[in-house]
Image: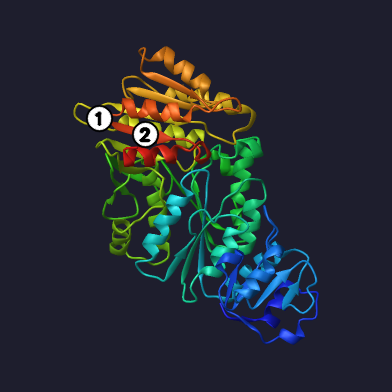
Amino acid sequence: MKVTLSELAKIVGAKNDWSAYADELVTGVEFDSRKVKEGDLFVPLKGERDGHDFIEQALAQGARLTLSERSLEGTPHLLVEDVLLAFQQIASDALKKSKTQVIAVTGSNGKTTTKDMIASLLATTYKTYKTQGNYNNEIGLPYTILQMPDDTEKLVLEMGQDHLGDIHLLSEIAHPDIAVVTMIGEAHLEFFGSREKIAEGKMQIVDGMAEDCLVLLPGDSIVDPYLPQNQRVVRFGEGQEIAVTSLVEEKGLLDFQVNFLKEPIRLAVNGKYNASNAMVAAYVAKECGVTEEAIQTGFARLELTRNRTEWKKAANGADILSDVYNANPTAMQLILETFSSLPSNAGGKKIAVLADMKELGPDSVRLHTELILSLSPDRIDFLVFYGEDIAPLAQLASQMYPIGRVYYFQKNAQEDQYEYMVKQVQEIVAPQDQILLKGSNSMGLSRLVHRLEAGE
């Protein structure tokens, strides 16, 4: 990024006299004062702390100037009404001036994995940059845009939503050339009230798109009322325009065929849903001109964001299937289906550690309880439940399972039995076992994964 202060002033509609600094050159953007480099524009966002309190620190570290909602005497700055809006305007303008093709990905489940897959395939042929970590919101997305290298040809952006309108904003900033909606589930149901509203929000990904752009959508009829009229829509899934035609799943491995590639795809991951994610990624790559040979190379090189359906090893030798970054009913059902269908290790048992799924609203207990349909003592030997809303599910499971095969540990305002839960899991797990861990990130199951790996 190389832009003069005068250019930035016009983009954000600065309200102060900046003429004394008009020719100052900005070479980067940063909102964390600790990371500011020489030549940066500092963006003092308001969060738990007001970034305006760190302007002096940022300038001392080499920031060329700062945005500000306050007039700053003698300090190089651009006075704006809303720093976050100005930040977004700068990112959107920078992207418009670049020659970068934008691929946007959203969905209740699978958006991060699909983003990683698309980026891996495109990187075989193009200079590619993608959303890092979970930088998928109104701050993270513009930051991603402004961090991408100048020679980026393909930019893969993940778009998340907590409330209706979030995706609309992100789409209007990025103006995607290709959009993907992986699926519509119950994530953040507390804030939306229904899957229909979630679908409405996800479909706003098309709002910033030009006409005749490609939109990939699941075959789920819930998106039908929101189908775009001016874009090229391709549906995917069973019986749809693009589909998985065969699939074989083993531990840590998927082999499957899709109906638009000659050769089958092999992935070192589990979960039939990942075959769908890979299919969509391959279609996007082919649309962008990546050869089938390069697509296979991209899958072979694939590195997924951590804590999403990842096999690990416990210190005692047990196999850990870690999926602890986030959870909603659809994702929980899918991972239980995958785990249940895998063959047990010789002489080993299967153990599932399940924790609360957050942000499900007033239907949370019901949605937890309905997961009883995904549990069977014939397919999963031991169950460990941890949380508050998951308690009724634990009670139902204890009626289905033999005595001593189901454990429940509280986590509520009165008591947190996390350490008791950890101790029980450690006592159950033997070297030849397989153990699944799934729950919302805030439930802390990632700490249990680390402790099993370390033998602590």
Looking at the picture, tell me which residue is in the foreground, 220 or 323: 323
Q: Which residue is mark 2?
A: 436
Q: Quarter of the image holding residue 406? A: top left
Residue in the image at 45% along x and 34% along y: 332
Residue 448 appearing in the image: yes
Q: Quadrant of residue 434?
A: top left
Name the one closer to the observer, 124 or 226: 124
- Residue behind mark 1: 344
Q: In the figure, 53 relative to 328: above or below?
A: below
Near mark 1 (Cα within 10 A), the count class, few <14, some 14-19 or many ≥20, is some
Spot occupied by residue 419 in the image (x, y as percentages of width and height): 45, 30
From this view, report whether residue 115 is shown above or below residue 361.
below
Residue 318 is tagged as none
Q: Amino acid at mark 2?
A: Leu
Q: Can you see residue 211?
A: no
User: For the N terminus, which image quadrant?
Assistant: bottom right
Image quadrant where one finds the C terminus: top left
Q: Residue at x 23, y 27 (%)?
A: 348
